[in-house]
Each structure stands twice: as C-alpha cells, then as structure tokens.
Amino acid sequence: MVNQSITKVLVGSIHELPDRLGKTVRVGEREVAVFKLSGGSVRAVENRCPHKGGVLSEGIISGEFVFCPMHDWKICLDDGKVQEPDHGCVKTFKTSIEGNEVYLYLE
C-alpha cells in the first residue's frame, strides 16, 4: 500500500517558461529547477548539482540534459542521473501541462 502525500504546485503559464532555460521554483524549503525543452515538454529536477551544489536552473540545456554551470557535469532531466565519467543523481519531479498551465508534483 502506498501512503504518500503529493502536493500539486502551479508553476505558471507554459508561455512564461523560456525555451531551454531554467526557472527556479521555491516551495517551502525546497528549490526546484523547471525547464521547457525545445519540443515543448517540461522537466523538473532538484536545483542543486550533486557535485558542488551548482544551481542547475542556470545550466545549459541540450536535448534532455542540463549541464551544471559550475563544472559542466551532464545530468539527464528524465531520470536525474549524472552522465559518465562523473557520477551521482539529482531528484526528479513529475510535471504536467493542463491547458496552458504547468504544474509540479512534490512528495
């Protein structure tokens, strides 16, 4: 039996999210980086690189990856895994687009 509390947070209009740039969303103590990819889909990850804490919302997007602005670590936006030769992982978050509104789901 799954017993989880999930919070749905409105990020804003899909039209307000810049293509292939990050937006920082703060919910309580948590900070999430939200990205609109070139195909129009949206991804969200913890806004902190596992290496030295680089702010991922300031990273460069290429395809389904974000590059940490501090040391260029390549992180997959689908599963949060750091790509080799580096290692580590960031938490990913589910998102949805309903009409023109983007939502983020936090556990």
Image: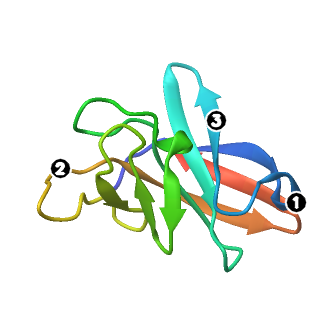
x 24%, y 51%: residue: 89
Towards the viewer: 39 or 12: 39
Q: Amino acid at mark 3?
A: Val
x 40%, y 54%: residue: 67
Residue 19 is left or right of residue 60, and the answer is: right
Q: CA distance from mark 2 to mark 1?
A: 32 Å
- Badge 1 marks a residue whose secondary structure is helix
Q: Quadrant of the N terminus?
A: bottom left
- Badge 2 marks a residue whose secondary structure is loop
The reply to whether residue 29 is in sight is yes
Q: Amino acid at mark 1?
A: His
Q: Which mark is residue 15?
A: 1
For disc 3, the neighbor class at 10 Å (few under 14, some 14 to 19, many from 20) is some
Give residue 4's position: percent from left, percent from top. Answer: 41, 45
Residue beneath disc 3: 25
Give residue 27's position: percent from left, percent from top. Answer: 60, 28
